Amino acid sequence: MKRITIDPITRLEGHGRIEIFLDDEGNVANSYLQVPEFRGFEKFCEGRPVEELPRITPRICGVCPSAHHMASTKAVDAVFHADPPPAAKKLRELYYSAHMCHSHIAHFYALAAPDFVLGPDADPAQRNILGVIAKVGIGIGGEVIKHRAYAQDIQAVIGGKATHSVCGLPGGMSRPITEEERKDFEEKAKSMVEFAKFSLKLFDDIVLANKDYMNLITGDIYTMKSYYMGMVDAKNKVNFYDGNIRVVDPEGKEIAKFKPADYLDYIGEHTEPWSYLKFPFLKRVGWKGFTEGKESGVYRVAPLARLNAADGMATPLAQEAYEKMYQTLGGKPVHATLAFHWARLVELVYAAERLLELSQDKEVTDPNIRTIPTATPDEGVGVVEAPRGTLYHHYKTDDKGVVEKVNLIVATVQNNPAMNMSIKKAAQKLITKGKAATEGLLNMVEMAFRAYDPCLACATHSLPGQMPLEVIIRDPQGNILERLSRKL
């Protein structure tokens, strides 16, 4: 059996490779997304004071530390049974809206756009952010950098640092913001709304106007039917910071809506010996293997899943963009994996509008931003919608607040079954008997996982209790002489 290896896979957070196995006819028999890195955050958080975790867990990732910081802070609130004052909640959401803007801008322009602006089979030396800037103009590149910086500035002021923030405390926030800071945020948010609108227009001009790209989005190569999960507010509109978790089936019908603390009643985790990543599934349906459709327990999170799981957006421009996306793609739910990119830009508009709304709310400058905990600590769950999907932090402590157990279910882990299935389907459609597996074609296989914006650093877990290890000995020509392994 012939093997094709894509190593490393590119334009993602973390390290991974794709192994594709061909049968004797030259068709794809199977494929695997493998993650060779290891993180043990759940284990080494044990024994620490729980209030330290909002400062420890963001170190999982330098791309989405704000998501871990907010989920962790909310979990610590729950451990101490401390409900933050309204001003603290708004300040947190303002901070978090800035994070969603910065992350979505980074993914679309740096990681996704090269495939569309330059083309899936463009020279890989040009198929990157520098190639994008060369194609669309330095002026647009400057706007990308400026607005990411705006979002980072807001996070730095509120969070203490732009990356690995320290603002979240049990029951509230570390410091209020001043009126001058609020006004500065408001001006930056106004510019962010305009930039989000521009980004949607750019997508219209480059992707939607290109028949070949639209055929890729709507075609069979990147389509997969699944369940979808996302956080919604009281009106079933998308919300990144707070709400209930809603799940819809492949036909768009609601099958569950639950409080974040009840997640274990709905989510199970399957394991495979060839991956550090677990494979979550819906308990109500059960694990049926790597199969799609209503009979499979596989579900998806992240931008398209959030929009599929919700009834709309809570801000006007985002709602308009939401309606256009579904009208163009034939109604809800949309199963086109590449439409995650479009949904990400709809969410960018929402995040920018929400950032503006909150920055114009004078209550965010209220100095009453903390409820001092008085209850005995025990157990708590904190959930936010990370840029890459629903993020769960679950902590158990003793009566002194020392951590006894930590469970993290991150977005990329929840998308892990779907990513493997999407890669396999794309490979089977693209790599066939008598057709050469060119670099451009293999990049199109990578596009199947890139749409999910995976963060593999966040996702890796160790199951065997001993880190698997593989040593490959090669001669000077690169031929394998010996392969030694442990726990593989």
Image: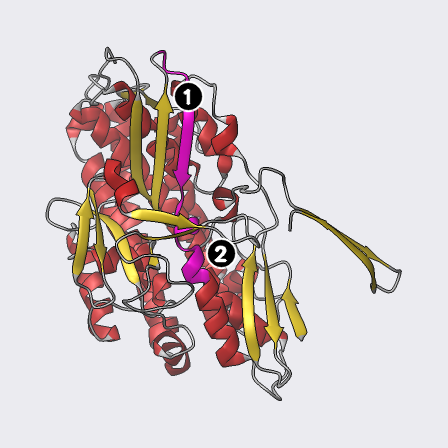
Residue bearing the label numbered 2: 110
Instruction: Locate residue 436, reporting x and y percent.
Output: 63, 83
Above or below: residue 336 compared with residue 265: below
User: What residue span does the magenta drawing correspond to?
Assistant: 400-419
| Other residues around mark 1 within 10 Å, as few (<14) / some (14–19) / many (≥20) | many
Q: Residue at x 21, y 62 (%)?
A: 322
Asked which secondary structure carries label 2, the reply is helix
Left or right of residue 331, residue 449 in this image: right
Asked which secondary structure carries label 1, the reply is strand
Q: Residue furthest left?
A: 235
Q: Residue at x 59, y 60 (%)?
A: 9
Q: Amino acid at mark 2?
A: Ala
Q: Residue at x 24, y 10 (%)?
A: 374
Q: Residue furthest bottom?
A: 434
Q: What is the CA distance from the residue labelled 2 to the residue labelled 1?
A: 38 Å
Q: Amino acid at mark 1?
A: Val
Label 2 or label 1, whichever comes before in sequence order: 2
Q: The N terminus appears in which quarter of the rendering?
A: bottom right
| Depth check, front residue: 148 or 299 | 299
Q: Residue at x 26, y 43 (%)?
A: 265
Residue 257: give its label. none
Residue 403: give its label. 1
Instruction: Locate residue 444, reporting x and y percent.
Output: 52, 72
Residue 283 seen in the figure: yes
Instruction: Locate residue 270, reporting x and y percent.
Output: 43, 51
| Other residues around mark 2 within 10 Å, as few (<14) / some (14–19) / many (≥20) | many
Residue 117 seen in the figure: no
